[in-house]
Amino acid sequence: MARSANSTRRLLDNFYLSPEQLENSPSRKDGIDRDTEAELRSYGCSLVQEAGILLAFPQAVMATGQVLLHRFYCKRSMKAFNVKKLAATALWQGAKLEEVPEVSGHPRELLNKVMVAVDRAMQRRDAPDGRKLTVLDLHSKEAEEFRRSLIRYELEMLKAFGFVAHVEHPHKLLLNYCQVLGLDAPAASLEPEQAPSCPEFLQEAWNVANDSLRTTLCVRYKGSVVACGIIFYTARRLKVPLPETPPWNALFGSPLQQIYEVAATLHQLYRAQKPRFIPVCHQLLPSKPPTPALAAAQGEAAGEAGATPLLGRPGRPLDPSVRRVVGDVSTRAVGATPGQVGAGAGVGLGCDC
């Protein structure tokens, strides 16, 4: 039974891409450069993390949400899906997968909490200095549009993943590897004042593991490789020696070259500036083409001026050239004041992509 469960877990844990596949992501094909895509990924993950902290969710919920966000943008373009709304959807899905109590008891209340928390996280990040933060009105038209967008994003996310949303995190492996390597106790080769204690090294490694979710490591390497890379990077930061005979990485079957690549990615992460929102999602969804019956009715209405066409207003025929924008976000963005209208608002979700 245990062998069967492990085999199933290995079959599900197969969402890993090569560097060439990441370079040819849907966002890159739509003209978004590498730095912009990386910054928006990091920005979305920061929203997931901060909103989850506001809701007092377990760290596993935020970790799962961030992995789902990275995976989704490997399948869909940032130009078609707003990163702010996707962050809220990813946190909502992470809460479902990790089975927070509200999922079974009050699912609508869970969605409302996620909406309010993500809106507050966006305000804290994007609002001008000195501006008073507001609470999202769940009965407003903006909140209703936000709610509909999250439901649509959820369906699109599940279709993109083929309804397989299994996630394996490196955190558990990280703790086990530290125990095997004896990193849960001060190193005997160091002076007592230089040797990091168990809580210090483990806490530092745990923090690095959480921060690593803002990068694409979760879609490039398996959890065992990421855990080894985190140990290597943390050991270098705290100046803790690792066993060389036999090589410590050989115990866990992780190639040294991949460990170096993980450490280099983490080093670049900590050198980068605070991620900011870059509006790249400006593609609106077109309306669906009319059904044959509706098209015929429109044709008859065009030939009979003043007639009452199907689904039209009395005395006003339908104009086929007029296209209805799906999901237009009323007059202001979610979280913005009435004076801040459209995409220029200081805080908001932008287009309803």
Image (cartoon, rainbow, N blue to C red):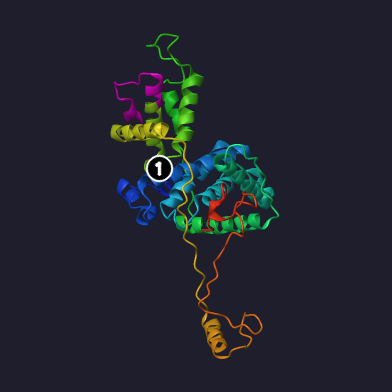
The one of 350 and 159 positioned closer to us in this rendering: 350
Which residue: 62% across, 80% down? 312
Left or right: residue 13 compared with residue 100: left
Inspect this view and state whether residue 185 appears.
Answer: yes
Q: Which residue is rendered at x = 59% and y = 83% of the image?
A: 317
Query: Which sits in the foreground, 70 or 28?
Result: 28
x and y percentages locating residue 302 in the rendered image: 54, 87
> Is the residue 45 above or below the residue 230 in the image?
below
**In the image, which residues are magenta?**
234-253
Which residue is most to the right?
139
Q: Is 237 one of the magenta-colored residues? A: yes
Where is residue 222? Give x, y as percent.
Answer: 39, 40
Report which quarter residue 247 is drawn in: top left
The residue tagged 1 is: 216
The residue lying at 53 percent from left, 54 percent from top is 343
77 in the magenta segment: no
Q: Horizontal and vertical percent for residue 225?
A: 37, 35
Q: Is residue 152 above or below residue 231?
A: below
Whether residue 253 is visible: no
Question: Residue at 65% of width from left, 48% of height from top?
Answer: 110
Horizontal arrangement in the rendering, residue 272 relative to residue 163 (left or right): left
Q: Nearer the viewer, residue 160 or 182?
A: 160
Mark count: 1
**184 up-or-down from 300: above or below:** above
| SS assignment at label 1 | helix
x, y (%) of residue 210? Answer: 48, 34
- Occupied quadrant, residue 240: top left
**Amino acid under disc 1:** Thr
Question: Residue 101 falls in which quadrant of the image?
Answer: top right
